[in-house]
Image (cartoon, rainbow, N blue to C red):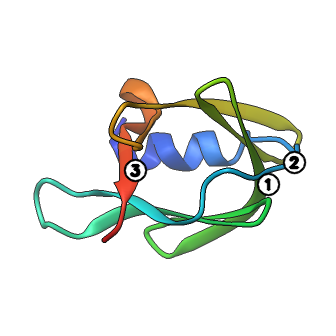
Amino acid sequence: MKKAALHLLLIATLAACGGGGLSGEYGSVNEINGRWDTLYTFKGSRVEIDLLGNIQVGSFKVEDGKVYITFAGQTQAMRIDDSGCIDGGLLLGRACKKS
């Protein structure tokens, strides 16, 4: 399964919690075409996840070096690395703050 399809499957299974701690746009660049595949926009306790034009809205919280993104009844945890990027492992990849 392609990475974008895996992102979409995960987004469809996320849940609802509360947020804070991250702000702005984070994303990952497609290695083939150089465009942003996935964009996370954190504002307040809300996160918008834009996957190839399909935008989902959820909430998030930061706790113990992880960001917990929630959508549709389930929570997905992603580690915040030493560079401040969010790392979803092999399934989601790494998303760094846009400059």
Residue to which mark 2 is pinned: 18
Judged left or right of residue 31, residue 9 is right
Report which residue position mark 1 lands on.
Answer: 59
Instruction: List x then y, in percent, for residue 32.
Output: 10, 58
Identify the residue under disc 3.
4
Left or right: residue 29 versus residue 98 is left
Above or below 11: residue 66 = above
Answer with the quarter of the image where residue 49 lies. Answer: bottom right
Q: Label 2 vs label 1: CA separation?
A: 6 Å
Q: Is residue 42 above or below residue 16?
A: below
Tell me the kind of residue under disc 1.
Answer: Ser
Q: Amino acid at mark 2?
A: Gly
Q: Please state the horizontal and vertical placement of residue 46, each as a whole percent of the image.
A: 76, 63
Q: Between marks 1 and 3, how big is the CA–CA gap?
A: 21 Å
Residue sitting at x 49%, y 76%: 53
Of labels 3 and 2, the one closer to you: 2
Q: Earlier in the sequence, mark 1 or mark 3?
A: 3
Horizontal side, residue 59 vs residue 62: left or right: right
